[in-house]
Image (tube, rainbow, N blue to C red):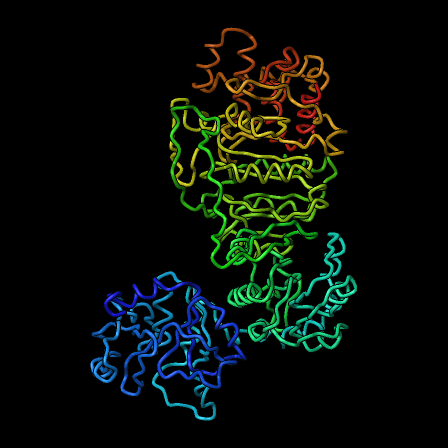
Amino acid sequence: MSQKFSCTEELLQALPQPIAIVGNGIPAGAMGAAIDHHASVIRLNNYQLAGFEAVVGSRTTLRCTSGWSDIEPRGQVGEFSPFTRDSRESAAVADFEQRSGFQLICAATDVHALVPGVPNPSTGLALAALCSHLGLQFSLFGFDGFVSGHYWNPGVKNATTHSGVERDVLLGLPGAVFYGQSYDYASLYNFCHAEHAGYNVNEGLALYRQLGCVIEGESILEFGAGNGDLSAFMQKQGNQVTALEVSKVAFDRIPVRSKINGDCITLAGLTQKFDRFVSVDVLEHLTENDIRVVLREAARLADSILVSVSTRLSGLLGPQGENLHLTVRSVEWWRDLFSEHFDVQLINGLDVGQVMLAGNRRAADAPRPAKAARAADRFDLPAAYVSRAKPVYYADVADDGLTWQPDVYPTAAEIARSLACDTLIDIGCGQARKLSVLHPEFKLIGIDYGGNMEHCRSKFPFGTFLEADFEDIAMLPLPGRVLQNSVVICSDVIEHLVDPRSLMNALRELLRHAPALVLSTPDRERTWGKAHMGPPPNPAHIREWTLAELSALFEREGFTLAAGTHTRSNDGSPDLATIMLVLVNPEHARIRDSAFAAKPAPQPVAQPVAIDAPSATTATATIVVEGLEATTAAAGEQAMANPTWRARLTRARDDREMLRVLAQMSLDLGHPDRAMDLYGALLSTDGADHDALEGVVISQIRCGQHADAARLLESVRGN
């Protein structure tokens, strides 16, 4: 072996994974079966096996040792050191090699640099740090911070120069799964079952029944069984059920005969095999380390799984004020974690944030299914356009004093009012400043990722905030009953994505139930000019569209476009440089009963797609202009006093163009009421004037007449 591998790193990287690293402290229970189930088993120094197989297993792949003077020479399996040959821990290696008769493989990496907070690392910590550094997947057994003696001599506590802080370091190593007591679940859930009345109601049984689950003739292990109602129900369906519950208060209420009072570490001591592992809204109550323990053991014990998790904060707190959901992660995170062991299917749950994962265990030598490659797509942009390869993360921090997309959220709120919806769902909510002001009129659901979510959850407890990877959305856990009464907002998100198809697929799925979606993004030509062909000057943007291009993209992707217009990018500039689309679900009952129900006529991809031209009679009936002469005179006087607008006015070729200049000037200079009259006059004589229609809608929004703007857009679509 010393000839085959030049260093410890090469040896470790050649091992099948996951690797069990077995320390010599007293394990948290009978870990033998769990240890032996690992692909490779590494034991430390003077380990013992005879008579302790139930505790630490019987398999050994390699022995790891520093070669210190008290280490027995054995040579029964391959041996190596996690330290470099010139480290202080290797001072006795030459003597060990002489005693054992072979050369010890040593590391090339100085592990002290990997654990700078531990000046004198033990052999076990050095090995774990090296495995983590190499990106290996490994489990840790028998590491308790040197609290106990050796497992073969538990009554004798050995003197050590190592620090008890090593246990905390081990818990934080990437790639490690720590098999040990990491959290006092028993005390916490004894409190919950005694103090929270809701814990006496078995939500798992309610979910199981409402989803119509039928499992018959199987052996089932339910983890986190609560009061046992679901276990009892599955048993009545003809299954053999074993219920495992950590709370003694709840355990005593479980009516099935086969039950175990224990936690995730208890799973490692089980040897019985099951057809199915069931757990309903339990895993989010564990630490991330312990979730990995549960899934690794579920894959050892059962052929298939049926698990539900919540991806939102709990509404209940523990005795120290801690949120009961210790792990709040995205659906994508859960999917990837389960996929290490199972081929899973995602099923939307019954509550916001709830998702079910069901599937069969994958064979140990079977590769994880590869993601399907996506065909190249220009996303309806010009052939000459150049997109950015990768964006920088956008932190939604208010530091410029401006409100961006100031008209998008009021428009969405007005559409929600007109459709009698009680919920707003913001895809890419950022720090939710614009969304939050719409509470308490609406229930709020915000979806984003990173630091934005931490901010939202702490600052706006009245909202529900979920995490999602917009580049790879597995599922947005929003039940149909909630979506039926929701308007969706997606404001300035699509331009940040390398591949927007994942987002568009998710939005299309939401619109199977939700009535309407309001989407915005910067207009490339109105922001940078017609000659701009990318990449966007904003480093957080991948690509930017024009109104015609974006409308064509969404229609090509199967969306029903009800309206497309421009609005302000921010409240510090009058420029209408942001695209705003209203996309609808024509099958929704409230949309069928509204003017939005009419589907747009097909548009050639190369042609601009905007709001359908209204008939002149519709516009005349909608826009009533009174006192036009006085309004025009006031605007004209202001225009002649301004050199820029005076020059534009003198270049006007006819009365309509003069009226258009006056309307645009009034809007830009902060007189939306005057602009509304002037644009209305243009629209009343030419119902096909798209610019005038856009001007009326923007003027109404700026005057706070959001309902009028929404009705005008609906009337346009209806005609």
Q: Looking at the image, which residue is at 65% across and 47% down? A: 478
Q: Can you say whether 362 is above or below 219 in the image?
A: above
Q: Is residue 321 left or right of residue 202?
A: left
Q: Can you say whether 197 is above or below 333 in the image?
A: below
What percent of the width, then of the height, locates residue 522?
A: 48, 32
Q: For this rendering, which residue is in front, 510 or 341?
A: 341
Q: For this rendering, which residue is in front, 424 or 602?
A: 602
The answer to whether residue 675 is seen in the rendering is no
Indicate the quadrant containing the N terminus: top left, top right, bottom left or bottom right: bottom left
Give the residue at the far right of this rendering. 236
Q: Looking at the image, which residue is at 60% across and 61% down? A: 303
The answer to whether residue 291 is seen in the rendering is yes
What percent of the width, then of the height, locates residue 600?
A: 64, 22
What percent of the width, then of the height, locates residue 414?
A: 68, 35
Q: For this rendering, which residue is in front, 99 or 563?
A: 99
Indicate the quadrant containing the C terminus: top left, top right, bottom left or bottom right: top right
What percent of the width, then of the height, locates residue 511?
A: 65, 37
Q: Is residue 79 left or right of residue 374?
A: left
Q: For this rendering, which residue is in front, 104 or 476?
A: 104
Quadrant of the image occupied by residue 438: top right
Q: Can you say whether 341 is above or below 97 in the image?
A: above
